[in-house]
Image (cartoon, grey):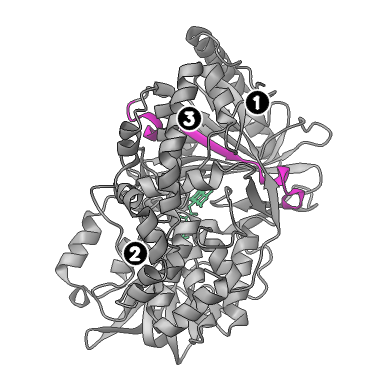
């Protein structure tokens, strides 16, 4: 992930672990099959799945959901929509993504009067959820727009997940369901893997032999000091002013001095670490490219080493595990909203900011669609993407160099999504996993970043049955940041052309989903999302996953913008993409708006 010392693990960041010797029961591909056989099997599988998919589509068309409610499943506190009049607060936060809510929650805890203006009718941004009533009206399917992979959400101490620090500060713990295993379908075969210190060696032993295992072990040793260095400075200790000398540098000086050498390696691309560690095995390189891509949207030569080192620290410890919040991403969003509101902050839904007000060269508030204005005495914080933030500012309010910088920042591609509700009554295969990852080819041009190549699937109801009606499941399959927006740009969503493209570009998702979960089970609800859907519901320019800032070539900007009083937090700001990162960016922004004394008191309260 495009980070520095915190290295969050965005997207379906996974870890290597091991094969445990057994082939996933769902897979028709045993490990170490000759490649030609594997390809033949894959082609047969695709044909089979295509037929199944057609059947399912016919089926669900007959049973189209009776109600599609893109509405919060449980967010009763979320306050009113925009009305008329003007009001004054200390800070207006534009957007209720995890970055915006983290910032607002801490600001409110610091004692500032804060209001969050969210354009959508539900909070959460990329982590929002919605429900669909089951055909026949019995129960709800909970669908998640984004994250499903979490770890260390209740972490404590210096090296913990920054989102855990925010939740700790707000005293809003989540009910976390631990698990270890996930399913991987690679060109080499299919297997179950686990987080943990050594199990991936079993996989390597079977796929590549003992030399690869030795190479992996050497890499683990090489990364160990980097992982320590990556957790030396907690991101919540950062702030964007000279006060950082007290809250971050002086406070953690002994750690910095003892690990400073390793820290120097953290800011370059992870591929450099691989070279220095002497990693040559093509499977290990492919695998790490995949992990990096899932973290940052970029392969190893674009992903900052700090992010991967942090991930190693989180997922290669002995006895580590992954965890899923009971209630899914909605539970995390609700916890943050509660944290904002119990400290006196407010969340305004359906409150689209049309303009950031700039007076005398300083950001002074926002104007909402409908005309309502909210004045901000201290600051305006934008959690919208940089291109979207730029649109909210009058041209003359922004220095040309900043405008150019935003316009020149490369954007990661967008997503295709497939959301399914299906019936598994009495048919649930033992061991159906929450997470599945499919890589169709390592050799496609662009490797793991190639279009239509990597499919991620999560079946959240496997771990939390409350997310689907009794006996049913809710599944989210998606192409992670590989769908070009250009293919969809300008299309009318009601046009035949759009429908055809949807059908064509989602085929690979159906194939992925059918691969391990739906073989004989009817899909009762089905929704396909495109980059236009992503753009619309996540309010993100071009439906992008975030900025494609390559390690070693560019830096994520810090929160303060060149417009005094305007700050930016979220995945377009340091440290980058992913829940831990955007929570860190929200915290850094909030800290930058209060005194060193208040900030230090928070760090003491967190015990770091
Ligand atoms: C499919 C998918 C899977 C993912 N999986 C994982 C995962 O497993 N683990 C992980 O750590 N990360 C994952 N991520 C990444 C992670 O979800 C995001 O990086 C993170 O949620 C982004 O948060 P944010 O605060 O930067 O912004 P956003 O979530 O984009 O929030 C911005 C908010 O601002 C609002 N807004 C925008 N413009 C305006 C306006 N003018 N007025 C008012 N409101 C406005 C938007 O409506 C939105 O609510 C995934 C992302 C996706 C898309």
Residue at horizontal 80 percent and vertical 42 percent from the top: 471
- Tell whether position 594 is magenta: no
**Residue 53 visible (yes or no):** no
Expressed as whole percent of the image width and height from the top left, the position of residue 174 reads 67, 62
* First-in-chain label (3 vs 1): 1
Expressed as whole percent of the image width and height from the top left, the position of residue 451 reads 39, 33
Classify mark 2 as within 8 Å of ligand 1 or not, answering yes or no.
Answer: yes
Farthest residue in the right direction? Answer: 426
> Which residue is the site of mark 1?
20
Residue 5 lies, with reference to residue 449, above or below; the image says: below
- What is the distance, in whole Å, between disc 1 and disc 2 at their CAs? 46 Å
* First-in-chain label (1 vs 2): 1
Farthest residue in the left direction? Answer: 400
Residue 37 placement, left or right of 290: right
- Tell whether position 464 is magenta: yes
> Which residue is the site of mark 2?
388
Residue at horizontal 37 percent and vertical 77 percent from the top: 592
Classify mark 3 as within 8 Å of ligand 1 or not, answering yes or no.
Answer: no
Residue 458 placement, left or right of 13: right
Residue 56 placement, left or right of 344: right
Expressed as whole percent of the image width and height from the top left, the position of residue 361 reads 22, 84
Residue 32 lies, with reference to residue 492, above or below; the image says: above
Residue at horizontal 29 percent and vertical 62 percent from the top: 557
Q: Along the line of sight, which residue is nearer the eye, 5 or 189?
A: 5
Please report the bounds of the magenta region as a residue range. 445-468
> Which residue is the site of mark 3?
217
């Amino acid at each position: 992930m495009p980070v520095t010392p915190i290295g969050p693990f965005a997207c379906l960041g996974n870890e290597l672990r091991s094969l445990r010797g057994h082939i996933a029961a769902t897979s028709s591909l045993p490990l170490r099959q000759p490649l030609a056989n594997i390809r033949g099997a894959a082609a047969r599988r695709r044909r089979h799945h295509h037929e199944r998919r057609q059947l399912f589509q016919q089926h669900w068309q007959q049973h189209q959901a009776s109600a599609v409610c893109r509405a919060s499943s449980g967010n009763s506190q979320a306050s009113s929509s925009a009305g008329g009049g003007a009001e004054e607060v200390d800070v207006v936060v534009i957007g209720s993504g995890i970055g915006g809510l983290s910032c607002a929650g801490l600001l409110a805890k610091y004692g500032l009067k804060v209001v969050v203006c969210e354009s959508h009718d539900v909070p959460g941004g990329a982590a929002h959820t919605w429900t669909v009533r089951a055909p026949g009206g019995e129960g709800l399917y909970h669908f998640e727009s984004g994250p499903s992979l979490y770890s260390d959400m209740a972490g404590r101490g210096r090296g913990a997940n920054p989102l855990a620090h925010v939740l700790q500060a707000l005293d809003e713990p989540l009910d976390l369901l631990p698990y270890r295993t996930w399913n991987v379908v690679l060109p080499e075969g299919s297997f179950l893997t686990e987080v943990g210190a050594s199990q991936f060696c079993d996989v390597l032993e079977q796929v590549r032999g003992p030399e690869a295992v030795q190479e992996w072990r050497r890499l683990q040793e090489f990364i160990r000091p980097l992982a320590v260095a990556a957790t030396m400075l907690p991101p919540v200790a950062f702030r964007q002013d000279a006060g950082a000398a007290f809250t971050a540098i002086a406070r953690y000086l002994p750690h910095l001095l003892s690990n400073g050498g390793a820290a120097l390696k953290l800011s370059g691309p992870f591929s450099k670490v691989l070279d220095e560690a002497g990693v040559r095995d093509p499977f290990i390189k492919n695998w790490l490219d995949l992990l990096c891509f899932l973290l940052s949207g970029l392969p190893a030569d674009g992903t900052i080493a700090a992010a991967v080192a942090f991930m190693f620290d989180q997922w290669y410890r002995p006895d580590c595990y992954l965890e899923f919040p009971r209630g899914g991403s909605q539970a995390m969003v609700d916890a943050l909203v509660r944290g904002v509101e119990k400290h006196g902050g407010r969340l305004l839904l359906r409150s689209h900011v049309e303009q950031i007000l700039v007076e005398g060269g300083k950001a002074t508030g926002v104007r909402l669609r409908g005309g309502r204005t909210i004045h901000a005495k201290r600051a305006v914080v934008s959690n919208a993407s940089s291109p979207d933030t730029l649109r909210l500012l009058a041209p003359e309010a922004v220095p040309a160099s900043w405008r150019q910088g935003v316009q020149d920042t490369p954007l990661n591609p967008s997503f295709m999504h497939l959301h399914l509700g299906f019936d598994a009554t009495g048919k649930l295969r033992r061991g159906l996993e929450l997470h599945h990852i499919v890589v169709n080819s390592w050799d496609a041009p662009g490797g793991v970043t190639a279009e239509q190549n990597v499919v991620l699937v999560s079946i959240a109801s496997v771990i939390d049955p409350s997310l689907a009606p009794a006996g049913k499941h809710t599944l989210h399959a998606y192409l992670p940041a590989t769908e070009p927006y250009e293919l969809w740009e300008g299309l009318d969503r009601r046009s035949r052309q759009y429908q055809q493209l949807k059908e064509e570009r989602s085929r690979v998702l159906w194939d992925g989903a059918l691969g391990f979960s739906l073989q004989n089970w009817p899909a009762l609800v089905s929704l396909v999302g495109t980059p236009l859907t992503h753009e619309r519901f996540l309010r993100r320019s071009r439906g992008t996953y975030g900025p494609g800032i390559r390690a070693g070539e560019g830096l994520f900007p810090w929160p303060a913008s060149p417009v005094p009083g305007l700050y930016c937090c979220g995945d377009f700001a340091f440290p980058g993409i992913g829940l831990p990162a955007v929570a860190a960016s929200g915290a850094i922004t909030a800290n930058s708006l209060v005194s060193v004394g208040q900030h230090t008191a928070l760090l003491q309260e967190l015990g770091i």
